[in-house]
Structures are given as structure tokens and as C-alpha cells.
Amino acid sequence: CSIKDPDSFKLEQPDMLVFNFSFDDERYFFSGLIKQVEDKYIINLHSDLFYLQRRKSARMEIPDDYPSKAKVISFNGKPISFELKVLDFSSGGCRLSFLSIDPMIIFEDKFRTLITLGNRSSFEVDVQVRHVKPINSIKDLPQIMGVQFISKEPAFEGKMLNLYMDVQREIFLKYYKK
């Protein structure tokens, strides 16, 4: 690689650095040994390339005894029904838990779900799996996944932000106020 402004970066001797870069609105990072050869820099990779998972909005942990669920009504375009526990919630997505190995949830799966938080009416939303805890056997259960809400409705994120604040207030008053 090369540096746009060579005077801004001086490398006296090879050094280990952590590098990060953006590609298609996603962020990645890795570590490596960098050394200078004339006016070029050579990076020897010393780790895997990691994807930096980031949420656009703050997440709220859902207490274990708070009534929350996500009922799946279609999975990858096929009608199917199973229930998930909501572990955390934000205006852009949530983290879910599933106590079965079937179906096996993988990165980029899409499903339609009815999410219920507290005693409110459920809302229907399409989601896409953005992260999943690896499962190698039944001993690794539950399956835990982070999903992103997918909505074509312009006001959806605002509605989710209002719901987030409402649930946050309820949880604070019920679980944390002394």
C-alpha cells in the first residue's frame, strides 16, 4: 500500500499495527506487521480479517422475567411457526434466543416475525440475521442471533424508537426503581 501524504506517517522500523477500513458501508479490521520498503509499505497479516458489527442505535437488555417473544410466521420465504425469546431490543433490530437446533439459523437468513414486548400489541416485521452464535451440537444451545429490522415503511424506524423509549421507561420503573 502507499500513503497519500508520506510526511504524515513516519516508520523508523517494522511495527505491529491494527488496521481498519470501510467497504460498502461495512467496517473491517486486522492486525499485521508493517514495514517500509522505499516509498511503499508492506503489511504481513498476523490475524484473520474481522468484520466490525455495529448497531446504528442503542440497545436495551430485556430482563429474563419481562414478557417478550418473537413468533416466526415465515422463514426464508416458507410458512413455518416457532417462537424465540427477545434478549435485547433497539430501534433497528434485536437479539433473539432459540432453544432448538431445528431450524438451524445462519447468517443472512430472513424471516417474518410478530414481536411482542410486555403487554403491548405485537408488531409484524421482516428481519435479516446479521450475527449468529455458532452451534456445533445440541450442547451449544440456545441459538442466539442478532437480527436487523427490514421495513420499507418510511416511519418504521421512528415508531421503533418510540417503542424503545416506552419499553425502556417501563423496564426502568418496574425493575430498577428502588
Image: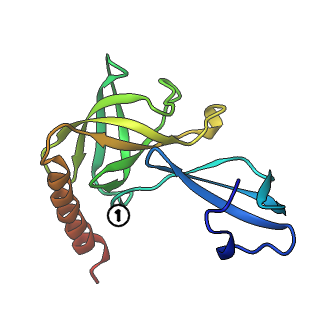
Residue at the image position 67 percent from the left and 47 percent from the top: 49
Where 2 falls versus 109 (above or below)? below
SS for callout 1: loop
**Residue 8 x/y as whole percent:** 65, 75
**Label 1 crowd (10 A; few <14 / some 14-19 / many >=20):** few
Determine which residue is flagged by label 1: 58
122 or 21, which is in the foreground?
Answer: 21
**Residue 69 x/y as whole percent:** 30, 43
**Residue 115 x/y as whole percent:** 25, 42
Q: Quadrant of residue 9?
A: bottom right
Amino acid type, label 1: Ala
- Name, please, the residue furthest toward the top: 78
Residue at the image position 46 percent from the left and 44 percent from the top: 24
Q: Is residue 136 left or right of residue 130?
A: right
Residue at the image position 66 percent from the left and 32 percent from the top: 136
Which image quadrant: the C terminus?
bottom left
